[in-house]
């Protein structure tokens, strides 16, 4: 099932055309990775889906709801921003309660489990300002995962996490996939993409250059690593 | 024995004759007396007679006095004009009115109806009376050598020409003494027109809705030890020369159009040892010449003095300017008056040679007050930062101020003057 | 409970934890105590407090709020990934600042002057100070919404603050000085009414003794500034002054890329 469908998305900031007519669809039960160099437009694409950036042209639908027509579609989304910057005087528990308040339910069991998984038990009632970067990122993960959303949008999710938490986080993500949820992520770490992604979207200068499943890509190029496979495709296309 | 008796009778009889002959005739008036009304008593009274009026309320319309009598109230008899009549009208010399309470004179838009009116007379004495709720209270017209002393005058406390006239109103007079009276609730507390060579002292005039004291064309008068407080406008004196105002207090005349003392066309006069406290403007000088303002205290007024440039050759010296919002303002960049040797509490200069005189001149006219004098609209900027900043700049760099008025010999210490 | 209130509560809770905001309250209270200690004359105390208000309130309100607004961008981003609308996020942020800064101001002035709580002039001062806080918060948020670059935003706001607090009155004075031969009542009044700092000052001053020094003898001033009329007018203009920038900022925020 297509959970996210983007059609001919365009966005320009002043003189820079950041998205030049992007179309894509993301299915559930899959992990889709958006790749691309810095300033290729991938963060803008995610922000458009989230409604943080309002596109100049094109449409986005999430679970069949047009994103320009409301904000309630976001109840389907759990978002993990790259650098969380929560108000320093609030506690993780309060944030969780706030989100629960907004979403209308508190997933007690899941929270308990995730707090255990990420070993956040001792930090839930401390002001966020007093937490380390890694712990903040774990809180970030918790907030994205706890409400068991249909769609997870993860922007460079493992960057601030220690190896152990990182692997636990990946486990969580894979589990969601198996449960039939949709995952859309960006990452610079090729190993991580290889480990997680079923499909990759390569964006360069505001356009999607490659939209393919990982298996198909490797098969077509005969390369074993994703990185090489991508490089080969690009070479071909320029040649 | 009988002879002795006869002698006694003869003595008594002769005394009686002597009295009724007018040397010292005394007629008593009271509800149980032979004469029940003042009018009846006046009918029979000879010149120089004393009418002893005992306590009670007398409603007799207008009592006209045309003989030189002494009207003496005993136990504060009340003369009531019932809101219709002029109560006491005197047209004779040497009349004394003492110890009465005179109330409720009539009102009129055409005539000046008074509680006590004295016309065309000499040597009258009005003293120790209480006047309440009269249109005009004490009204003297065309008199000489009269004394108005120690009267307590409470007006109708109503604002408007149609409701209240003046407390002590004197027109065309010479040699008058107005002393120790208390006046409130009238239009003008004390009003003089063409009153000359007179003394006004020890009076308190407060809470009158126009002026505490108002005079015109009243030369060579002396005002001393009076208190003018909280009058609607203040004290306004006009078109007069050779006045002396000394030891008076002008205070709390506060309002958009109020001032302590307006000197309008006052020439060759002296204002000395007075205190101006918390008036919108302490003194406002308009068209005055050769008048000296000396050894006065100006305390916490809006403007201590507003001296318009049409005033010339006046001297302002040895005064204390203490904590006024503006010390001096004027409407022209030059001011042809001598302002020298005053103490200014906001002077920030120094005295290196220790002679008690500041080494740099003081410029009492702030740029802001100068602009405001010419264009009052700018007053919306009162208490603005910019203005405070401007004042600060002026204090440090006096040259930027276009107004050249300055005190070249500002005193370092307050002037200690004695009354 | 509607989302707006939930967000507002969270914002307030966050503001409550910022220590130097409490220092703002304490310094206001400290200065009020000091002034009260130096003078017994309530009129003078209120005038001194007016000066402090006119200087501190715009400065603290605008610079704290623009910094705070920039700092909370990523949190707003996080909130907007939840099912809430931009309007809810924007207005809760603004309202929390309005409420909290007003509370701090009112507290700082009122605590030392609690004995004067029935003095109407104190209330005029309080309302003026609160409105002035709200005006500068709205302006800060507007500037923060317009400029994404923090340095540009803060510089612009600094200029605006300087203009409104000091220079504008200089312009009025210059206009009067240069055109002194023309009747200027209306012009001056209009110029004063377009500046929230002047409005706050005039609202207090026309209720004090010093009002007698203003040209209230002039018919227009008496009519416009006299008594309750002038006060309502000044307050109404200040309400416009915080409502319009806020509204404009909310429109811009709706379309803004975060």
Image (tube, coloured by chain):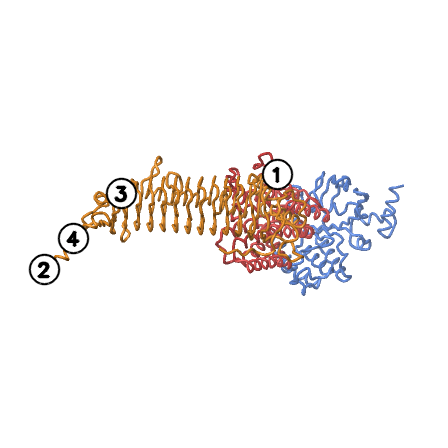
Determine crowd level at label 4: few under 14, some 14-19, many 20+ residues with C-alpha closer than 10 A. few
Q: Earlier in the sequence, mark 2 or mark 3?
A: 2
Q: CA distance from mark 4 to mark 1?
A: 89 Å
> x and y percent of residue B157 in the render?
38, 45
Where does label 2 land, which residue?
B2
Where does label 3 land, which residue?
B67
Front-most of residues C191 and C81: C191
- Which residue sits at x=69%, y=54%? A144
> x and y percent of residue A67 in the render?
67, 43
Q: Choose mark 1 or mark 2, whichever is in front.
A: 2
> x and y percent of residue C47 in the render?
56, 52
Where does label 4 land, which residue?
B13
> Of helix, strand and loop, which one carries label 2?
helix
Q: CA distance from mark 3 to mark 4?
A: 26 Å
Q: Chain B: what color?
A: orange
Front-most of residues B209 and A88: B209
Q: CA distance from mark 4 to mark 2?
A: 16 Å
Query: In the rendered image, what is the letter of the chain coloured red?
Result: C
> Of helix, strand and loop, which one carries label 1?
helix
Q: Choose mark 3 or mark 4, whichever is in front.
A: 4
Q: Earlier in the sequence, mark 3 or mark 4?
A: 4
Q: Is residue A233 left or right of residue C232?
A: right
Task: Say whether residue A152 is visible.
Answer: yes
Where does label 1 land, which residue?
C176
Q: Chain of mark 3?
A: B
Q: Chain of mark 4?
A: B
Q: CA distance from mark 2 to mark 3?
A: 42 Å
Determine crowd level at label 1: few under 14, some 14-19, many 20+ residues with C-alpha closer than 10 A. many
């Amino acid at each position: 099932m297509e959970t996210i469908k983007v059609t001919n998305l365009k966005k320009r900031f002043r003189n820079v055309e950041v998205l030049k007519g992007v179309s894509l669809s993301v299915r559930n039960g899959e992990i889709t990775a958006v790749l691309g160099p810095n300033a290729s437009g991938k963060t803008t694409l995610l922000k458009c889906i989230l409604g943080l950036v309002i596109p100049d042209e094109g449409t986005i639908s999430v679970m069949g709801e047009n994103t320009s027509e409301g904000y309630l579609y976001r109840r389907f989304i759990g978002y993990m921003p790259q650098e969380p910057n929560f108000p320093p005087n609030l506690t993780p528990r309060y944030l969780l309660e706030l989100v629960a308040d907004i979403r209308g339910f508190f997933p007690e069991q899941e929270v308990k489990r995730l707090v255990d998984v990420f070993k956040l038990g001792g930090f839930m009632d401390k002001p966020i300002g007093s937490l380390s970067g890694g712990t903040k990122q774990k809180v970030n993960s918790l907030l994205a995962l706890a409400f068991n959303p249909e769609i997870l949008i993860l922007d460079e999710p493992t960057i601030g996490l220690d190896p152990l938490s990182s692997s636990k986080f990946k486990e969580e993500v894979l589990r969601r996939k198996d449960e039939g949820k949709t995952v859309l992520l960006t990452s610079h770490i090729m190993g991580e993409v290889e480990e997680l992604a079923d499909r990759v979207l390569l964006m360069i200068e505001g356009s999607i250059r490659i939209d393919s499943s990982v298996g198909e890509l490797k098969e077509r190029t005969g390369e074993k690593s994703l990185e090489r496979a991508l490089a080969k495709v690009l070479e071909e296309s320029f040649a | 024995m009988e002879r002795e008796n006869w002698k006694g009778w003869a003595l008594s009889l002769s005394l009686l004759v002597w009295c009724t002959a007018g040397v010292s005739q005394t007629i008593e008036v009271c509800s149980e007396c032979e004469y029940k009304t003042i009018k009846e008593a006046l009918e029979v009274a000879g010149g120089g007679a004393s009418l002893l009026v005992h306590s009670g309320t007398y409603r007799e319309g207008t009592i006209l006095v045309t003989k030189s009598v002494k009207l003496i109230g005993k136990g504060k008899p009340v003369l009531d004009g019932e809101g219709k009549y002029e109560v006491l009208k005197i047209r004779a010399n040497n009349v004394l009115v003492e110890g009465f309470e005179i109330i409720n004179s009539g009102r009129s838009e055409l005539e000046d109806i008074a509680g006590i009116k004295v016309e065309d007379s000499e040597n009258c004495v009005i003293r120790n009376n209480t006047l309440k709720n009269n249109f005009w209270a004490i009204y003297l017209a065309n008199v000489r050598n009269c004394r108005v002393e120690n009267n307590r005058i409470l007006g109708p406390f109503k604002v408007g020409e149609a409701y209240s006239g003046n407390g002590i109103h004197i027109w065309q007079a010479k040699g008058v003494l107005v002393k120790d009276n208390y006046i409130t609730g009238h239009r003008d507390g004390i009003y003089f027109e063409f009153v000359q060579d007179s003394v006004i002292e020890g009076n308190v005039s407060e809470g009158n809705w126009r002026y505490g004291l108002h005079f015109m064309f009243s030369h060579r008068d002396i005002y001393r030890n009076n208190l003018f407080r909280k009058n609607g406008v203040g004290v306004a004196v006009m078109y007069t020369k050779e006045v002396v105002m000394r030891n008076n207090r002008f205070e709390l005349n506060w309002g958009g159009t109020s001032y302590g003392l307006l000197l309008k066309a006052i020439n060759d006069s002296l204002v000395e040892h007075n205190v101006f406290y918390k008036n919108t403007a302490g003194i406002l000088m308009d068209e005055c010449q050769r008048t000296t303002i000396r050894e006065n205290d100006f305390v916490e007024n809006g403007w201590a003095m507003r001296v318009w440039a049409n005033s010339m050759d006046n001297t302002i010296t040895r005064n204390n300017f203490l904590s006024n919002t503006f010390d001096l303002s004027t409407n022209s960049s030059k001011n042809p008056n001598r302002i020298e040797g005053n103490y200014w509490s906001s002077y920030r200069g120094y005295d290196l040679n220790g002679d008690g005189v500041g080494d740099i001149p003081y410029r009492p006219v702030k740029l802001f007050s100068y602009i405001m004098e010419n264009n009052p609209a700018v007053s919306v900027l009162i208490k603005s930062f910019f203005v405070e900043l401007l004042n600060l700049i002026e204090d440090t760099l006096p040259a930027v101020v276009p107004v050249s008025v300055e005190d070249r010999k500002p005193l370092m210490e307050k002037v200690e003057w004695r009354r | 409970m509607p989302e707006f209130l939930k967000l507002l509560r969270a914002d307030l809770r966050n503001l409550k934890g910022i220590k130097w905001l409490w220092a703002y309250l304490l310094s206001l209270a400290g200065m009020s105590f000091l002034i009260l200690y130096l003078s017994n004359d309530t009129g003078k105390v209120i005038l001194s407090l007016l000066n402090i208000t006119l200087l501190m309130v715009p400065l603290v309100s605008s610079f704290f709020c623009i910094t705070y607004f920039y700092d909370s961008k990523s949190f707003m981003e996080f909130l907007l990934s939840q099912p809430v609308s931009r309007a809810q996020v924007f207005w809760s942020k603004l309202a929390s600042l309005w409420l909290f800064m007003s509370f701090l101001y009112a507290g700082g002035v009122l605590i030392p002057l609690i004995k004067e709580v029935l003095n109407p002039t104190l209330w005029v001062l309080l309302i003026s100070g609160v409105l002035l806080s709200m005006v500068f918060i709205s302006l800060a948020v507007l500037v923060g919404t317009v400029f994404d670059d923090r340095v540009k935003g803060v510089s612009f706001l600094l200029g605006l603050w300087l203009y409104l607090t000091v220079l504008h009155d200089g312009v009025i004075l210059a206009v009067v000085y240069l055109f002194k031969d023309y009747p200027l009542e209306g012009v001056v009044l209009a110029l004063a009414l377009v500046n929230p700092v002047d409005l706050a000052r005039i609202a207090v001053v026309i209720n004090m003794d010093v009002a007698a020094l203003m040209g209230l003898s002039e018919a227009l001033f008496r009519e416009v500034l006299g008594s309750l009329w002038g006060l309502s007018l000044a307050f109404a203009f200040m309400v416009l002054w915080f409502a319009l920038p806020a509204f404009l900022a909310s429109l811009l925020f709706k379309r803004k890329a975060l």
